[in-house]
Image: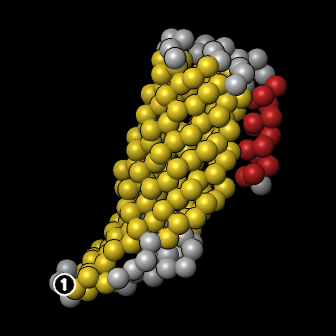
Amino acid sequence: MKLKALAAGILLAMAAPSVMAEGFYGAFDIGQSDFKKGCNGVAAGVSCKHTDTAFRLAAGYQINQNLGVEGAYVDSGKATASAPGIFTAEVKSSEWQLVAMGTLPMGNGFSLIGKAGFAFWEAKPSATALGAAVPIASETGNDFLWGLGAQYDFTKSVAVRGQYESHKIGNTTLDRGDLDTFSMGVVYKF
């Protein structure tokens, strides 16, 4: 259902007129990541945190007024768990993204944005038990990424955007689950 809604939003964005200028842009976003299954199966008395700060550095090209492409590097932060004196564990995540961006102008500088593409992620787990390091292999993968948001153009060169995006993460060592990110950012158009 989510994919159908996203596809419909992108098609509407491509059909509507827009004021967004064509050309290159760069963006910096900061927000909160949520590793949805990051604390599943954690025993009582164990401290666990499945949210962290996420950063995105992106570059894109607005192909026409309603369709663009964007590539980004994202540091998604980490999920952590610990029982003092017994064990600590964390999983750090980072990824490269390649997405198509759809823009649906709403008037007065506001636009709705949608994205669909791929996240090429790496998850690096680490753990200690009774003070000794426990070897755990890193995992990599790629998954479908989708997102929705809004953008406000202050000028022809500067805009702010807020967005939500989601994709799966994890293969074998890590429970496969959603990695969701809410972020706000600044866009500079060249």
- Eyeballing the image, is 41 above or below 112? below
Q: Residue at x 44, y 28 (%)?
A: 186
Residue 157 x/y as whole percent: 50, 14
Q: Which residue shows up at 75% across the image and 29% down it?
A: 13
Q: How is the image coloured?
A: secondary structure
Question: Would you place residue 40 above or below residue 63 in this image?
Answer: below
Question: Residue 67, relative to residue 140: is it above or below?
Answer: above
| Depicted 29 relative to depicted 81: above or below | above
**Is 165 placed left or right of 90 in the picture?**
right
Can residue 46 be seen from the camera position used here? no
Q: Which is nearer the eye, 86 or 133?
A: 133
Residue 152 lies left or right of residue 91; in this view the side is right
On the image, which quarter does residue 136 sit in?
bottom left
> Is residue 135 visible in this depiction of the protein?
yes
Residue 115: % across, % down: 65, 41
At 82% from the left edge and 25% from the top edge, which residue is drawn? 15
Question: Amino acid type of disc 1?
Answer: Gly
Q: Position of residue 138 (x, y in %)?
A: 44, 72
Which quadrant would residue 18 be assigned to in this image? Answer: top right
Mark 1 closeness class: few <14, some 14–19, many ≥20 residues within 10 Å: few
Q: What residue appears at the point 54 percent right and 70 percent down from the top-left corner?
A: 170
Residue named by callout 1? 131
Q: Quadrant of the N terminus?
A: bottom right
Q: Give how far across and how far down residue 85 sits, in percent.
A: 17, 84
